[in-house]
Image (spheres, rainbow, N blue to C red):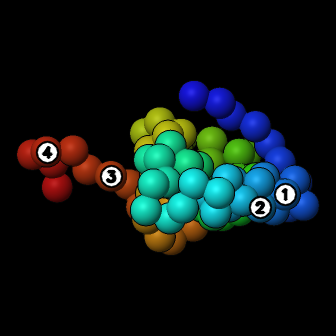
Amino acid sequence: MWCVKLSDSERDALRALIKEQVAQVGEDEISPALEGALEALDLARWDDLPEASLPWDRVSELAGKQGIGEADVVWDLAAGMASAGRRREGPGQS
């Protein structure tokens, strides 16, 4: 498997090259590899999302207040937990 970072114009040029190859062999004889490459190039543009950033000081604060790990706080925030947070209770606790 190869992993490369392409600009939009490079991705478009590679897509055009693959489509030209498909045109030469014919739509009926397209290999699964070429078909997969075209699909991957179409999906690749959606992978160029900006990097996420979290307020780690707030994450650490919430983890300390709730007595849970930072990963659990991130999970809760991703699920829509209010930023004020609430203490998680384990099984058998109320």
Disc 1 marks a residue whose amino acid type is Ala
Question: What is the number of the mark on residue 21?
Answer: none
Disc 4 marks a residue whose amino acid type is Pro
Earlier sequence position, callout 1 versus callout 3: 1
Answer whether labels 2 and 3 touch (C-beta < 8 Å): no
Q: Which residue is mark 1?
A: 13
Q: Which residue is mark 2?
A: 16
Q: Position of residue 92 (x, y in %)?
A: 9, 46
With respect to residue 48, does 65 lie above or below? above
- Structural distance between the alpha carbons of marks 1 and 4: 56 Å
Mark 4, Cα crowd under 10 Å, few <14 / some 14-19 / many 20+, is: few
Answer whether labels 4 and 2 touch (C-beta < 8 Å): no
Answer whether labels 1 and 2 touch (C-beta < 8 Å): yes
- Structural distance between the alpha carbons of marks 1 and 3: 52 Å
1 or 4: mark nearer the eye = 1
Q: Residue at x 76, y 37 (%)?
A: 4
Earlier sequence position, callout 1 versus callout 4: 1
Earlier sequence position, callout 4 versus callout 2: 2
Q: Which residue is mark 4?
A: 91
Answer whether labels 4 and 3 touch (C-beta < 8 Å): no
